[in-house]
Image (cartoon, grey):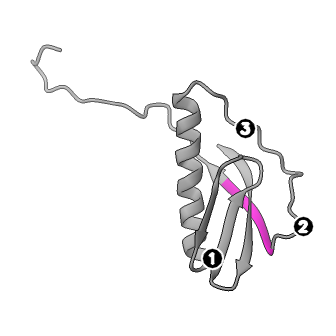
Amino acid sequence: MLTYKAMYKYLDKGIHGEVLDFPGVITWGADLEETRRLLASALVDMAETNLLHGEPLPKPDPNNTDPDADLEEPIHLLLTAATRVALVPQGTAQ
């Protein structure tokens, strides 16, 4: 598990969210719950993209901060070892 830092900024019509130490992980939602969910999904998507392209994941930096943030909190990335598994029925040649 890698722990990055998420930030949220309250706007007039919703909430901006981004992962401060993983460039490109950014979203917007109508409320904090939706923004948290969308940000977690964006983090997974960006991590998978990096790995598929043979690029390393950014190293988490707990010291990253944004002075304009209304809220900062940890966001966790759980990696799974097998993302592509296929089941072959018994007795079937592959």
Q: Which residues are magenta?
A: 70-75
Whichever of labels 2 and 1 marks the residue nearer the N terminus, that label is 1
Eyeballing the image, is 11 above or below 64?
below
Label 3: state its secondary structure.
Answer: loop
Quarter of the image where the C terminus is located: top left
Asked whether the beta carbons under mark 2 and mark 3 sit within 8 Å of each other, the answer is no
**Residue 80 % position (x, y):** 50, 37
Q: CA distance from mark 2 to mark 1?
A: 19 Å
Whichever of labels 1 and 3 marks the residue nearer the N terminus, that label is 1
Q: Which residue is mark 1?
A: 32
**Residue drawn at (86%, 62%) of the image:** 66
The amino acid pointed to by label 3 is Pro
Looking at the magenta stretch, what is its main secondary structure? strand
**Residue 68 % position (x, y):** 85, 70
> Which residue extends farthest bottom?
12
Q: Which residue is mark 3?
A: 58
Label 1: state its secondary structure.
Answer: helix
